[in-house]
Amino acid sequence: MLVSFLVPPVVVGEHPAERSSGCTRVVYPTPNIYELQVAACVEQKYPITYLDCVNHSIDAEGLMTHIQRHPADVYAIWTVNLSVQNDIEITRRIHAVQPNAWVLLLGPGASWFHKECHVDERTIVVHGEPEMTVMELLDKLDKHEDWHAIDGISYLADGKHHRNKMRALMKDLDALPVPARHLVSDIAYRNPKLKCTPYTTMVTSRNCPFRCIYCVPSSLTFAREIENREYNHRKPPISFRSPEKVAEDIRQLAAEGIKAIGFMDDNFIWNEQRTAAICGALRETGIVWGCQARVDAITEPIAQQLGSSGCRYVDLGVESFNDAILEYIHKGITSDQIYNAIRLLQKYKVPVKLNILIGTSPLETKQTIKDTIRKAKKLQVDQLMINIVSPFPGTEFYHMALENGWLKDGVYTPTDVQRESILNYPNLTNKEMEHLLFVSNLSYFLSPRFVWKQLRKFRSWSDFTHALRSLKIKLFG
């Protein structure tokens, strides 16, 4: 049985969805490490192919021609909210030319919009954490055995939608094979914050224990959270890979020629001992890297470890410098902790990227947003990223938005958080938020200080042109 993983071309809308974080359009190419993890599990037992139509500039006609000439038994698509309608249409087109093939839709978009994704009886939605569900499903399909009772799926049968109970989450991430990065070795991935290639991504843990009302930092986290909240009415537990296994994989990536790694963990820093063990492997290999972290996780020993091991950025999700807003959104931090974390990181020469999120609560006004951005700029961190909050389905914030009538049209529609808002507060409209975002980004990214600081870091003309293209997409689409 041949399994084909697809990153479909755009047939609905204008811009491809970024399927790793899942909440923006593609700004620069990033490997979907979550999909590659599933592919690694599958290829241990079945022959597979991987076709990234976006990065290989293959249009819909080209994809259909490929499917006719090289048919597979099963097609797998990692679906996010921004790609749902696109992937539904692609599924229809696949079945028009290969009516006997199965299509598996994975990821958060399929988990939430599962009924819409039930295109026909040969389309199956894999909910939540996908690896074990996919493997059991493929085994049943391969043996022509009944698969309808498998945990963690939904499907259409006899004209009715069926959704099975949740599959238990994995406890041992070390048991997973290394993500199948070789499937995308012909794509030149880049991260403008690292400015070093070859580049890849890596994950050492799953989910986050904190209570931010709006937050789903990655598409896998989102899929797990949708499913766990539906059945257990709470956030899913955290899963970890051991620091020894992480260090082993880092050394292997270095041996394969990787020069830069972006860690995609919701929170990379958990404690000083684990951080020191992973930083040791990064220091040993000379790989440059970056990660996401909470400000209250940054201690002096951790900042020192980051600074001595090639850390080129730490993404700090601060959202606001207004303590009342931080309390409202259950961020669990204060503005004093933000300042302290930045001070420690700058002390050890670790570049800081501050993430500001507009509109996280009805306490926001034009004045609070401008005040937060002014304070963020004043800190002169390495980079500032400003987005607009989205009421992602399944989150506490989503239910608050529904109950209070904050949604623009009364219903959730997927939006690109880099440009769009569907929220209207009594004191702040979606259009006002979009205008503030555009003006703030324009003034920041085109400021002489930012331009000069970034120009000094580019190692080649190619790096510069890719960064310029990414900035154009971010600002203007």
Image (cartoon, rainbow, N blue to C red):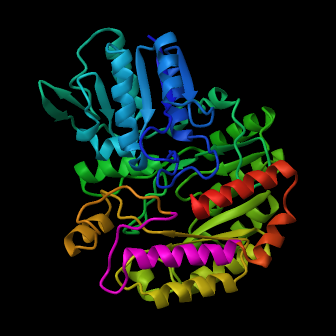
Bounds of the magenta span?
A: 418-445
Relative depth, front residue between 456 and 310: 456
Q: Tally the marks.
A: 0
> Which residue: 37% across, 15% down?
98
* Rendered view: 253 above or below 295: above
Q: What quarter of the picture does the C terminus occupy?
A: bottom right
Residue 446 appears at what percent x and percent y? 72, 73
Residue 400 appears at what percent x and percent y? 26, 71
> Which residue: 59% across, 33% down?
179
* Rendered view: 150 above or below 106: above
Q: In the image, is residue 296 part of the stretch drawn in magenta?
A: no
Side of 409 relative to 109 (left or right): left
Side of 339 relative to 43 (left or right): right
Q: Answer yes or no: is residue 358 visible.
A: no
Hey, which quadrant is residue 453 in on the image? bottom right
Residue 415 appears at what percent x and percent y? 41, 58
Q: Answer yes or no: is residue 45 visible.
A: yes
> Which residue: 55% across, 73% down?
438
* Rendered view: 3 above or below 297: above
Relative depth, front residue between 386 and 65: 65
Q: What quarter of the picture does the N terminus occupy?
A: top left
> Which residue: 51% across, 10% down?
69
Residue 404 appears at what percent x and percent y? 22, 75
